[in-house]
Image: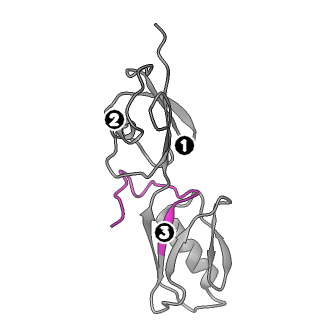
Amino acid sequence: MAPAYADEQAYRLDTDDEVRITVFGHEDLSGEFVISGEGSLSFPLVGQIGAKGLTARGLEVAVVDALKPDYLKNPSVNVEILTYRPFYILGEVNSPGSYAYVSGMKVINAVVLGGGYTYRAKQNKVLIDRAGDESRRIEASPETPVYPGDIIRVPERFF
């Protein structure tokens, strides 16, 4: 079952998101696709379709436009997000790295996935680099929500 993103309508697809595209009545065109590093996916018959920055609904429209009128007269397409891109946790955690996004995740859950704080961690000042229309850095508390693609930085404390 796909995770429920906090604001599904506003979620923009990006590299490493996995989607299921269903072209009704055409199982040969339906399947699961991962968005490449270039921001596109390789779709049967039509080749590359740009997906980066589109919503799921926007990708539906892009697939319909690519299929008609040359391949199908009136295609009916559905796009479902299967797996969101990972988030990253860096700095003063025991196992920094990339982790799968889980619906409803908060900073404290991300820290636990990262093996917990090191003894040098500044636990009360975690930073999140959040991508989107405008990339931004925010100060976060343990209860701050984490979103796909976030980069969480746990700084070192100085005595």
Whole-number angstrom distance, CA of label 1 to CA of label 2:
20 Å
Region of the chain picked out in magenta, as a range: 1-20
Q: Can you say whether 50 is above or below 100 in the image?
A: below
Q: Is residue 61 left or right of residue 139?
A: right
Q: Is residue 128 above or below residue 12?
A: above
Of the image marks 2 and 3, the number of the one nearer the N terminus: 3
Residue at numbered disc 1: 131
- Badge 3: how crowded within 10 Å, few (<14), some, or many (20+)? many
The local secondary structure at tag 2 comes to helix
- Give the quarter of the image for residue 65: bottom right
Residue 99: image location, x then y, percent? 46, 48
State the quadrant of the N terminus. Answer: bottom left
User: Residue type at mark 3?
Assistant: Val
Type of residue at label 1?
A: Ala
Q: Earlier in the sequence, mark 1 or mark 2?
A: 2
Magenta stretch encompasses residue 13: yes
